[in-house]
Amino acid sequence: MFTTLTKEQTAEDNVTTSHGLLLKGGFVRQSSSGIYSMLPLGLRTLEKIENIIDEELKSIGSQKLALPVLLSAENWKKSGRWNASKGEFFRLKDRRDTDMLLSPTHEEEITQLVAAELKSSKQLPMRLYQIGRKYRDEFRPRAGLLRGREFVMKDLYTFDASVEDAYISYDLVAKAYQNIFQRIGVPFVVAEADSGNMGGSKSHEYHLISPAGEDTLLTCSSCGYTANEELAIGKLPENNDNEVNNVIIDMNDTTTTNNQASTTQLQFTAFNKEGDSLHNGKATIVTLPGRSVNHIKIEKELRRYLEEQNMMPNDGILDLKSTLDINQQQEEQVLSNHVFIDDSVKSYSLSSSSGGQLIMHGPDHFRTASAGDTCASCSNNNNNNNSSENKKKNALTTVKAIEVGHTFYLGTKYSKTLGCEFLPSDRQKNKQKQAAEMGCYGIGISRMVATAAEVCHDDRGIVWPDTIAPYRICIVPTSNNNKELNRLAETIYDTLEDVTLFKVKNRGLFTNDIVIDDRKQMFGSKMTDAELIGYPFIIVLGKNALEEGIVEVNQRVQGEPNIKNKVPIDQLGQWLFERQII
């Protein structure tokens, strides 16, 4: 087996524990900034996650395919994402000067593919997925596999004849995701999320709770409500400190005329998908002091208004910037002034110096929710129970988490633009073609490897869940020179590997999942490495194995000493089988 000198490898950044452990344990090696080679141990864990995903997605009727990594920019320009995501993607030109990119995602490509084949609603639903490499030009790659420039992803795309059918597909995939994460064996949470530039109206994120996470979730222990802070809604505790009254709003000043409210000013520009400027404006947001503005909610509300007023197309691009970045020439080009009133502002007036027509939005939840806010879901369902104890129980709390999966209902955002249409199955005359209803669903597989290591480790190394450990069992003879002991190790290996024994789903549970550490190293060093690598079960073969037919089985437990068991060799296979997580 290919092994590495684990003790010599250290992480250049100390952002996450997992990255250092994956380097020391011989799972990955850095090729360049944000790009990593998967070594045999890392690849085995990666492939085990892929196998679980394959089984669960195929169980809901999904089919696997492979899409190209090198993509033409043509469809990206049609969808508007070519100009909307400058700087994020690896772009290049071929020798004919044609724009191309390394795939960060495949919505346009899969839609083009299905559009060429889809004729009738009788062909629907379609559920197509792939597992492959993706690329993103991260400005500052960090934390190893958690934020790299090249990564392995599973992306599933669904095509349905109606919104109702698309929601059925969404729920089926959500159930498959639940099964996937439960089988992987790492605790996870599902959070309501923003769709971002993916589009669509329904979105959920799948997170593993970890202090190393970059996402902040707000959650309610009473009802289970969980949402990314970009989308979370929290009601302010009912007291005078959380109300803003008599605010005077001056569009020509970035601060209010009293200390009761906080004012933030932004400039926005609306573009069409080709990148041509259509409309400029200024947005002033008034919130409770000490509360940050939720820029995503501002952008959504502003986009909704501009689209309704035909000031920008629904596939256009909206760019929000701080007024601190605006020069005088840009200031003179402002065509409209928008005021966003947070629902914490109970009364306000406009300064006479503001001038011009102001477009008012709200009152609404334009601030970012914070820990201590009251859960809106609980509040809506418990209007008659306002006891202090109930309010405390319904308070939102924050946790840091790592996103490993995301699901989106896309609607017809891509299918309309790229002509993915079908004829309805009814027999009406002059029937019109309909755009397919789409969904997309991703899981970061290489990120999952790092996240599992981040969540499941202790001061001795990684503690992999059984289902994704590189090997379930490691056999460690106490002597390198005892030929009889080494022969016994091979006999135990062959017995456990027997495909006719210990079967699950018509395959041997331990087949191709056992390794013998026969390196010419000291026994203590081998045990240290076995704990670092994170084998769930370590079978120690010493003199008792030869004299009494008994081995010592060390079961790895996170944060605790190994559980040591004396097991007769003739009962070893059944003993191990009964303790496996399938």
Image (tube, helix red, strand yellow):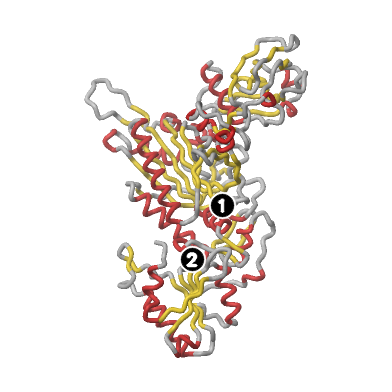
Residue 267 visible at all:
no
- The residue lying furthest to the left in this view is 427
Q: Nearer the viewer, residue 234 or 89?
A: 234
Tell me the element at label 1. strand
Q: Residue 240 in the image: x percent, y percent? A: 68, 23
Image quarter for residue 329? Answer: top right
Q: Is residue 313 left or right of residue 341?
A: left
Q: Identify the amino acid type marked 2.
A: Pro
According to the image, label 2 marks what residue?
A: 470
Q: CA distance from mark 2 to mark 1?
A: 22 Å
* C-beta proximity under 8 Å, tags 2 and 1: no
Q: Identify the amino acid type marked 1.
A: Glu
In the rendered image, the vertical position of residue 27 relative to residue 266, given as above or below: below
Q: Residue 499 in the image: x percent, y percent? A: 33, 72
In the rendered image, the vertical position of residue 169 relative to residue 209, given as above or below: above
At a point 44% along the width and 30% down the height, the residue shown is: 417
At a point 35% along the width and 69% down the height, the residue shown is: 508
Q: Nearer the viewer, residue 458 or 241?
A: 241
- How many marks the image carries: the answer is 2
Which numbered disc flags the more N-terminal residue, 2 or 1?
1
Q: Nearer the viewer, mark 2 or mark 1?
A: 2
Label ID, residue 552: none
Q: Nearer the viewer, residue 156 or 273?
A: 156
At a point 36% along the width and 39% down the height, the residue shown is: 169
Tell me the element at label 2. loop
Q: Residue 93 in the image: x percent, y percent? A: 57, 43
Q: Is residue 259 left or right of residue 175?
A: right
Q: Is residue 255 left or right of residue 23?
A: right
According to the image, label 1 marks what residue?
A: 150
Instruction: Name the quadrant of the C terminus.
Output: bottom left
